[in-house]
Image: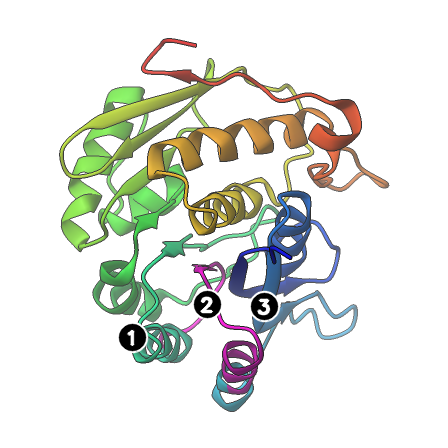
Amino acid sequence: MGYPVRVMSIAGSASGGSAGIQADLKTFQELDVYGMNVVTAIVGRHPKTNKNVHAMTMEAIEAQFATAMEQVGVDSLKTGMLFSKEVIETVADLIKEYDIEKVVVDPVMVGKLDSKLLKDEAIESLKDKLIPLAKIITPNMPEASVLLNDRPIESVEDLKQAAVDLYELGAESVLVKGGRLAGPAIDVLYDGEMITTYEAPRIDTNNTSGAGCSYSAAITAFLAKGLPLKEAVRRAKSFVTTAIEHGFTYTKAVGPTYHAAARKYGEAYKIKIDGVE
């Protein structure tokens, strides 16, 4: 019997089910990989105190990681919301201790509802400790701007330059996502030698909660399956674009992407690479 490859998400738990650990595990299941998780914090706004982020202890994070590694092991790993300097440094140490090579770092900083998901003092630790361990980092435009000392990013050319400059932080490759630009949804990958653009149609919807988490989770899954990086990104973008198209909401709040969309509707977007479909 061929068992599924093993993937792990180290991220926050989003109680609404649309993002974070929940989005990652749904993505892993849809892509037929064995998903595990380490919860770094619980994100849920208390109706009386208004507190939104409830952090795990370092002991709890280390215990979750050790349990998953001892019981299962891992073929690739992604990080999402890490929240604090202490968590980032702990996670970086664990990645080095277990010699994990396929690491996807999604530098989550702000949620869809403007929840602050990374403390200011943690940004330097993210740059110095974790990003150099990554096979790929996947910042969106605001995250890339913060990592580049608040540099404005307003065009595809800005995306390309941002990817080149972020490469200097030490990751093997950089994917800067251009979802906030007008026009088609264009992302830029730089691997130290070549810039590659990925283009999909822009979906007119507000229901995009968890899209970034799901995108990086899909890349993690495809890397675990042994796909080359450029193909992993292409398939992941196709998966998440389909999920965005079929996003929905139960209330007036920003709703989730629909992870089962490609399976349920038999659709998969064709992605243009460097302008060619």
Residue type, numbered disc 1: Lys
Residue at screen point 29% across, 75% down: 96
Mark 2, other Cα within 10 Å: few <14 / some 14–19 / many ≥20: many
Q: Are marks 3 and 2 in contact (CB under 8 Å)?
A: no
**N-term-proximal mark, 3 vs 1:** 3
Q: Are marks 3 and 1 in contact (CB under 8 Å)?
A: no
Distance from the alpha carbon under mark 3 to that under mark 1: 18 Å
Question: On screen, 237 above or below 110?
Answer: above
**N-term-proximal mark, 3 vs 2:** 3
Question: On screen, 229 above or below 10?
Answer: above
Q: Which mark is residue 82?
A: 2
Give the magenta-colored segment's residue range: 63-85
Query: Residue 122 magenta-drawn?
Result: no
Q: Circle 2 — which element?
A: loop
Relative side of 149 to 34, left or right: left
Mark 1, other Cα within 10 Å: few <14 / some 14–19 / many ≥20: few
Q: Residue furthest top?
A: 276
Query: Residue 75 magenta-drawn?
Result: yes
Question: On screen, 222 above or below 122?
Answer: above
Image coords of residue 148 (percent x, y): 23, 46
**Which residue position is annotated with label 1?**
96
Q: Which mark is residue 266?
A: none
Q: Is residue 267 visible?
A: yes
- The part of the image, by quadrant, that contains residue 255 is top right
